[in-house]
Amino acid sequence: MRAYVYGAGGAEITDVAKPTAKGAQVLVRVRACGLNRADLGMTKGHVHGAAGGVGTVLGMEWAGEIAEVGPDAKGVKVGDRVMGSGAAAFAEYTLADHGRLFHIPSASNMGFEEAATLPVALATMHNAVVTNGALQAGQSVLIQGASSGVGLMAMQIAKLKGAKTVIGSSTDPMRRGRLKEFGADLAIDSSDPGWVDQVLKATGGEGVDLIVDQVSGKVANQNLAATKIKGRIVNVGRLGGSHGDFNFDLHAARRINYIGVTFRTRSIEEIRDIFSAVQSDIWSAVESRKLKLPIDKVLPFDDIAKAFEHMEANKHLGKIVVTL
């Protein structure tokens, strides 16, 4: 089968062996894939968790039809239209655990391209905003890095769960200007030294109840200053750097609950629980398309290198999708 593989000369489309479903796995005939920032790094040879390096089939988000079911897979059958996440997505066929996928809503006529934008954003941000962030109706939340696909989803989930004030950050003026379309009551520029004052003003001087941080690095201490006493910070990403100065005294004085999350060290049982929580808590909003992401560009699989060039240019809003 054809797949997008990182080889000795870089990432390229090549032929690899078609996998077979075992245990609780299903084999999916992939019809569309969503691109993610981690994929971009892996096209350059970077490692993401246990994945990466020469010989790696790239990709982590897909939509398609089940072609084969392993002997221990439950709740699925051949022909089901599904979307999910996992390794080796950029290929004609990919394997997935039966608990790491969603059935594509049939009543809403959702296509594969739209479905391929959703799994990573839904699982990541429901876990960050609701499960770990413990957002309650009437509270305030700041999403750092809000113009990414997962950031746009985080703001929508926050609104769905009854947040009183949703603040989103983006350093790009065009994207920042569009954040209100996705639930932001206030859009800030995290590269502006005065953004903490803007957040404090919007929250009556107290700070936000919750920050979902995809930037980290240089904004770590500003985040502490913008968080309410006894508030929460959930660290999801490190687009602004994995290291930075940290004011431990301010952290202690504001009694902030600082939580780190990643899928890289989670067991399959934990991931199944995350997917199950999405389905039990917010799935009706997915079916009704209340929760959705804009598609910035769709390209055929043969042009996947161009899709990554478009991502690297960093001028898009929403998801980039490739179709097979």
Image (spheres, grey):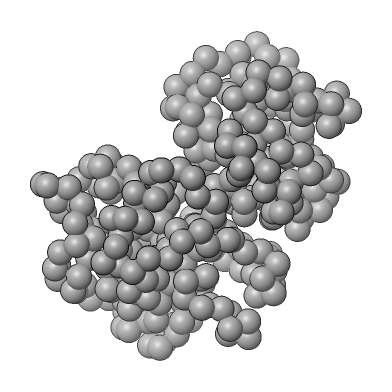
Viewed as shown, does residue 13 lie left or right of 40? left
Counting from the top left corner in percent of width and height, residue 165 is at: 81, 42
Q: Position of residue 37 (x, y in %)?
A: 41, 46
As drawn, is 201 to the left or to the right of 34? right
Residue lying at the far left of the rendered structure? 8
State the residue at coordinates (42%, 52%).
36
Residue 164 sits above or below residue 215 on the image: below
Q: Quadrant of the N terminus?
A: bottom left
Q: Position of residue 58 (x, y in %)?
A: 28, 56
Residue 198 in view of the camera: yes
The residue drawn where x is 49% and y is 45% is 315
Quarter of the image that includes the C terminus: bottom left
Residue that extends furthest to the top in the rendered view of this protein: 249
Give the residue at x 37% y 71%: 323
**Image quadrant where residue 268 sits:** bottom left
Q: Is residue 265 above or below residue 267?
A: above
Quarter residue 141 falls in: top right
| Residue at the (47%, 34%) spot, across then down | 239
Q: Is residue 42 left or right of residue 12?
A: right
Q: Residue furthest front?
A: 174
Numbered marks: total:
0
Q: Position of residue 55 (x, y in %)?
A: 15, 53
Q: Nearer the viewer, residue 137 or 97?
A: 137
Q: Is residue 73 visible?
A: no
Between 88 and 22, the residue placed more toward the observer is: 88
Is residue 277 found left or right of 101 in the rendered image?
Answer: right
- Quadrant of residue 181 within the rendered picture: bottom right
